[in-house]
Image: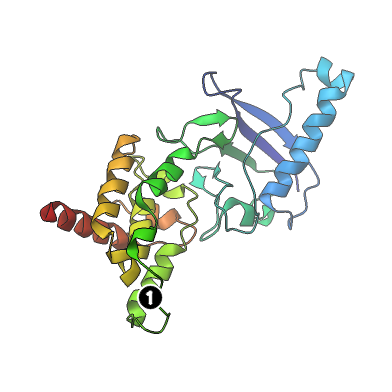
Amino acid sequence: MDFTLKVWRQKSAKDKGYFGTYQVKDISPDTSFLEMMDILNEQLIRENIDPVAVSKGCHDGPVAFDHDCREGICGMCSLYINGRAHGPDDDITTCQLHMRKFKDGETITIEPWRSAGMPVIKDLVINRNALDQILQAGGYVSVNTGGVPDANTIPIRRENAEESMDAASCVGCGACIATCKNGSAMLFVSARVSSLALLPQGKVEAARRVKAMVSKMDELGFGACTNTRACEMECPKRISITHIARMNREFLKAKIQD
């Protein structure tokens, strides 16, 4: 399979970006999207040291893009592909996308996430520190909650346990933020709040947690939720917006208790 790639190139956060156009040929349909990006980079490296290629203007250098596990777990491979977060498939991260989802000869446009809270560092790499700062503000259970009881001593409703685990499956990729027209981080934050709010060990610090995380989210410049559900539709783990409703209730309850 042959493809034309229009890839966002940007040397740094302060530089003006542009789309570089590249050709890749003889790509197997079973090649993953990130493997295809590796092939492109190998091609660009060869062109960068080939005097003939350089003379023709082929000297952009390899494309910077983020990845780690390549198993749909870490959430690092955040790419906007042909106008969709993680590309033309459902319930996957970019590393789980394969080239068989595209047509032979197709032009593929590849961009980084677009969010004021997560600016571009270089090419397709974004600054994800904002998500870490939100978690550091309260997305945890501290030692102040006391000792850890035996797992079977505190009964938890099955529905609560399963919903908590569903919320905890969020990989923090940021697709919800990139997809939202307001650049809202509400789905990400609410998933972290819900995963603990539904369990006994999370209730001790519930009020402090939700106030701190929402405050940090606002401070970092993320937008508000207007319930378009775009975040839910593009989330690779299908996190439900019902978690946003729970977070709002938790936040209101915490404010009333002040």
**Amino acid type, mark 1:** Ala
Q: Nearer the viewer, residue 218 or 197?
A: 197
Q: Name the residue under label 1.
A: 161
Identify the residue shown where x is 82% and y is 18%: 54
Q: Which of 127 and 148 is in front in this view?
A: 148
Residue 42, x across and y down, in percent: 80, 37
Image: 60 above or below 150: above
Residue 95, x across and y down, in percent: 63, 53
Query: SS class of the residue under badge 1?
Result: helix
Give left or right: position of 57 versus 90: right
Residue 111, x across and y down, in percent: 55, 36
Residue 124 picture quarter: top right
Residue 3 picture quarter: top right
Q: Which of 178 and 192 is in front in this view?
A: 192
Residue 53, x across and y down, in percent: 84, 22
Please, which colouring scheme is shown?
rainbow
Image: 48 above or below 1: above
Identify the residue shown where x is 63% and y is 46%: 67
Residue 28, visible in the rendered structure: yes
Residue 24, visible in the rendered structure: no
- Residue that extends furthest to the right in the rendered view of this protein: 51
Identify the residue shown where x is 50% and y is 56%: 171
Identify the residue shown where x is 50% and y is 47%: 85
- Graded by Cα atoms within 10 Å as few (under 14), some (14 to 19) or many (20 or more), the crowding at tag 1 reads some
Q: Which of 10 and 74 is in front in this view?
A: 74
Give left or right: position of 118 versus 256: right
